Image (cartoon, helix red, strand yellow):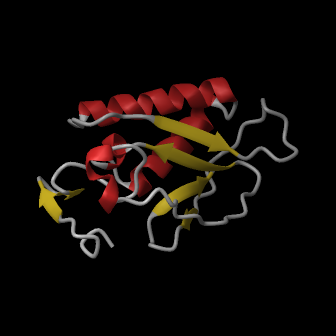
Amino acid sequence: RVQAAGGTVTCLMGCYRVMGMLAMSRALGDVIIEQYLSQEPDICDQALGHRDFVVMASDGLWDVISNPEVVQLVQSEGSKVGWNPDHLANVANKICLEAFRRGSMDNISVMIILALGDAKPHERAGPTGGEHRTRNGKTFAGQA
């Protein structure tokens, strides 16, 4: 789609970039290359069960840590410290620091969204494995 609009997609240091600048082809802002971008999001409906989670993060994380690694980190840390929002905020921070430690040179933001259902927030869970996939095969959620 970018190339059909007259733009270019190049690979710089292992990262595909639109017009040699932007690391993704769907973005808001970036008015300099706006004509090559789309603000239409990819949307995938996924039913979440009790203690399933979604990790939303910027490419500064995904550049240096794989999807399965992030799922494993959340499962492992969540089962150690508990599944309440304060603990998950600390887990998200720990994942950001790990991305920085691995040399990420981009913005790093991580948010963990937990589906609690009818459970009490203080309940703890052990890992049960599993992961969900989007249309393009990328992992975006796991089960606690």
Would you say residue 64 is visible in this rendering?
no
Relative to 7, 44 lies left or right: right
Residue 123 at x, y percent in the picture: 78, 35
Does residue 14 appear to the left or right of 86 in the view shown?
left
Across and down, in percent, residue 127 comes to 61, 50
Q: Which residue is nearer to you in this view: 140 or 59? A: 59
Q: Nearer the viewer, residue 35 or 25?
A: 35
- Locate residue 141 relative to residue 122 in the image: left or right: left
| Of the pair 53 and 81, the residue shown nearer to us | 53
Horizontal side, residue 2 vs residue 86: left or right: left
Q: Position of residue 102 (x, y in %)?
A: 24, 37
- The image quadrant that residue 60 belongs to is top left
Who's the residue at 53% across and 68% down the image? 133
**Is residue 80 among the parts visible in the rendering?**
yes
Q: Quadrant of the N terminus?
A: bottom left
Q: Nearer the viewer, residue 17 or 57?
A: 17
Query: Which of the 4 image quadrants contains residue 138?
Result: bottom left
Residue at horizontal 58 percent and vertical 63 percent from the top: 130
User: Which residue is depicted at the point 83% across and 47% down?
Assistant: 117
What is the x, y in percent for residue 71?
Answer: 49, 51
User: Residue pushed farthest left?
Assistant: 13
Q: Residue furthest right?
A: 118
Q: How many marks?
A: 0
- In the displayed structure, 123 sits above or below 132; it is above
Residue at coordinates 27% horizontally, 52% vertically from top-left?
33
